[in-house]
Image (cartoon, rainbow, N blue to C red):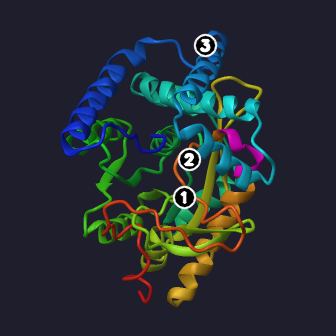
């Protein structure tokens, strides 16, 4: 799902907010399969109108999200994020939410009909020979990408953050219905489970453009410093599987269609420096592809270290200890 929600401060307020949001998603999954999908021009037009309204309302309320998104997009593209790009970004965000509600009602054939790929041969060859680990950013609909993979002979194992507390079980069940195996990102055995699944010919897919612990690896995103999780490089290196970056984007001409662009296999390198080098190649692929379709990058949280290139590495602080995100304890493995 696109980024984590925020709600009222204080434990009681947050718990109430999370329960309410979990119930809202549950309702969406019940009615979503009965709604028209995003291939309908009427739905696309509706999402465009709603996106403009939501963006205007958030600006009136003084929400931090429009400004944060504009900053992320400007630093990702090297050009100011104009109002039209922001509106398109909000429309893409809403499209992803709508499609996630639709997904439980789609057949495998319907899922496959909505996905186009580039570089798929590289992934399938690596997967067949020695397994593969795919690193993706929060771009377009990665749940649709997972459903497509499961339906085309590459069953997915992934990791999810329990951002809704106990209510996150609904997301886990949703992804299970799509054919995925889902591990908790805070589980100390997650790395070992991922390594085992990669060796056992499951496709390990990790969303890897947010350092949830503040202890990821320092890399460059274009001219800017960022911190990315070590998990994909660690799992690939320990399992012997190929590391393949990928970015999802929506087709701008054909409603309801999403592209998955797969990059070249990234060779394993030893030591902590090797993890950094591998993760840098992931960052390079992410940066190049996202710059071409920035509206589909659903990152509403602070990401870049500073507006100035060469600023200090960011410390995105959420509950620490995720073995999937951190690079420190796995650097020599």
Q: Are marks 1 and 2 in contact (CB under 8 Å)?
A: yes
Q: Is residue 253 above or below residue 70?
A: above
Neighbor class of circle 2 (other Cα within 10 Å; few <14, some 14-19, many 20+) is many
- In percent of width and height, residue 221 lies at 68, 65
Res. 263 in view:
no
- In percent of width and height, residue 268 lies at 57, 80
In the shown orientation, is residue 310 left or right of residue 38?
Answer: right
Q: Which residue is mark 3?
A: 46
Q: Residue at x 36, y 83 (%)?
A: 329
Which residue range is magenta in the image? 290-295
User: How far is mark 1 from mark 2, CA to CA?
Assistant: 9 Å
Q: Which residue is mark 2?
A: 299
Q: Residue at x 64, y 15 (%)?
A: 49
Number of labelled discs? 3
Neighbor class of circle 3 (other Cα within 10 Å; few <14, some 14-19, many 20+) is few
Q: Residue at x 34, y 37 (%)?
A: 7
The quarter in which the N terminus is drawn is top left
Q: Which residue is mark 1?
A: 209
Closer to the chain start, of discs 3 and 2, is: 3
Magenta-colored stretch includes residue 159 = no
């Amino acid at each position: 799902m696109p980024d984590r929600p925020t709600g009222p401060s204080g434990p009681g307020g947050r718990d109430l907010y999370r329960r309410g949001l979990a119930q809202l998603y549950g309702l969406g999954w019940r009615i979503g399969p009965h709604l028209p999908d995003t291939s309908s021009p009427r739905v696309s037009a509706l999402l465009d109108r709603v996106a403009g309204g939501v963006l205007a309302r958030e600006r009136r309320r003084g929400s931090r999200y429009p400004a944060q998104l504009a900053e992320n997009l400007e630093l990702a593209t090297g050009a100011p994020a104009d109002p039209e790009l922001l509106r398109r970004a909000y429309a893409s965000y809403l499209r992803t939410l709508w499609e996630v509600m639709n997904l439980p009602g789609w057949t495998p054939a319907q899922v496959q009909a909505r996905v186009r790929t580039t570089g798929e041969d590289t992934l399938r060859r690596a997967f067949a020979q020695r397994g593969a680990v795919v690193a993706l950013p929060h771009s377009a609909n990665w749940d649709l990408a997972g459903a497509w993979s499961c339906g085309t002979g590459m069953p997915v194992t992934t990791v999810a953050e329990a951002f809704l507390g106990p209510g996150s079980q609904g997301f886990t069940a949703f992804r299970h219905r799509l054919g995925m195996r889902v591990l908790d990102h805070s589980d100390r055995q997650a790395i070992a489970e991922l390594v085992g699944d990669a060796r056992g010919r499951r496709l390990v897919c990790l969303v890897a453009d947010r350092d949830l612990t503040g202890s990821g690896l320092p890399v460059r995103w274009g001219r800017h410093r960022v911190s990315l999780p070590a998990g994909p490089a660690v799992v690939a290196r320990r399992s012997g599987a190929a590391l393949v970056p990928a970015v999802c984007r929506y087709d701008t001409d054909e409603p309801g269609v999403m592209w998955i662009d797969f990059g070249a296999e990234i060779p394993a390198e030893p030591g902590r420096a090797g993890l950094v080098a591998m993760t840098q190649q992931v960052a390079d692929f992410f940066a190049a592809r996202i710059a071409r379709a920035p509206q589909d990058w659903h990152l509403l949280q602070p990401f870049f270290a500073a507006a100035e290139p060469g600023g200090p590495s960011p410390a995105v602080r959420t509950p620490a200890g995720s073995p999937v995100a951190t690079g420190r304890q796995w650097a020599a493995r």
